[in-house]
Image (cartoon, grey):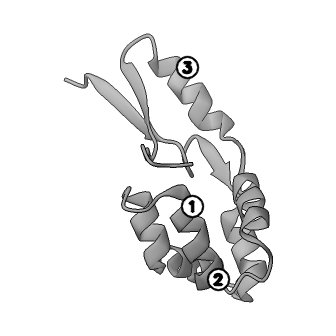
Amino acid sequence: MIKYILFDLGGVIINLTVFDRLSEITGIEDRQEVINYWTSLKSVVDYETGKMSDADFLRQLKQDLGYSRSERELHEEFRMWCHSVNIQAHNFTIEMISQYRIGRIQQYQSNSP
């Protein structure tokens, strides 16, 4: 019997435009190659698994990407990568909420700025 349904925010509930922008930054045109590149970055893995604070992640990501702008600009851009709500996932949660307990998963850092 299903008691709970959990949804990840990034890429499930919230549409991400990170891969489009990463293609521009890295020059990698193939979407799957861009995804593979992103998911292979140690900074991304450490951040997604809660081993790195927001500030440390942005600092390391700037270095990993060879990002020429400031960390502040990268932070603003990073926020924009979380583009919009996935309406299909949202509607599904509305349908399921009367039958199941619905929750969301997101990275949490108690030491984040």
Residue picked out by circle 1? 55
Where's residue 32, x and y in %? 57, 78
Q: As drawn, is 61 to the left or to the right of 44?
A: right
Residue drawn at 57 percent across, 52 percent down: 11
Amino acid carrying label 2: it is Leu
Amino acid carrying label 1: it is Ala
Which residue is more in the foreground, 58 or 92?
58
Instruction: Tell me the distance, in whole angstroms, between the alpha carbons under discs 3 and 1.
Output: 34 Å
Residue picked out by circle 3? 94
Amino acid carrying label 3: it is Ile
Which residue is more in the foreground, 75 or 49?
75
Residue drawn at 80 percent across, 76 percent down: 69
Q: Estimate how packed mark 1 is, as few (under 14), some (14 to 19) or many (20 or more) residues with alpha carbons within 10 Å.
A: some
Give the quarter of the image for residue 51: bottom left
Marks 1,2: beta carbons within 8 A: no
Kindly state the secondary structure of the residue where label 3 is placed: helix
Q: Which of pointers 1 and 2 lies earlier in the amino acid sequence?
A: 1
Q: As drawn, is 68 to the left or to the right of 8?
A: right
Residue picked out by circle 2? 65
Which residue is more in the foreground, 96 or 28?
28
Q: Is residue 26 above or below residue 92?
A: below
Instruction: Tell me the distance, in whole angstroms, between the alpha carbons under discs 3 and 2.
Output: 38 Å
Q: Which quadrant is home to the N terminus?
A: top left
Q: Estimate how packed mark 2 is, as few (under 14), some (14 to 19) or many (20 or more) residues with alpha carbons within 10 Å.
A: few
Give the quarter of the image for residue 65: bottom right
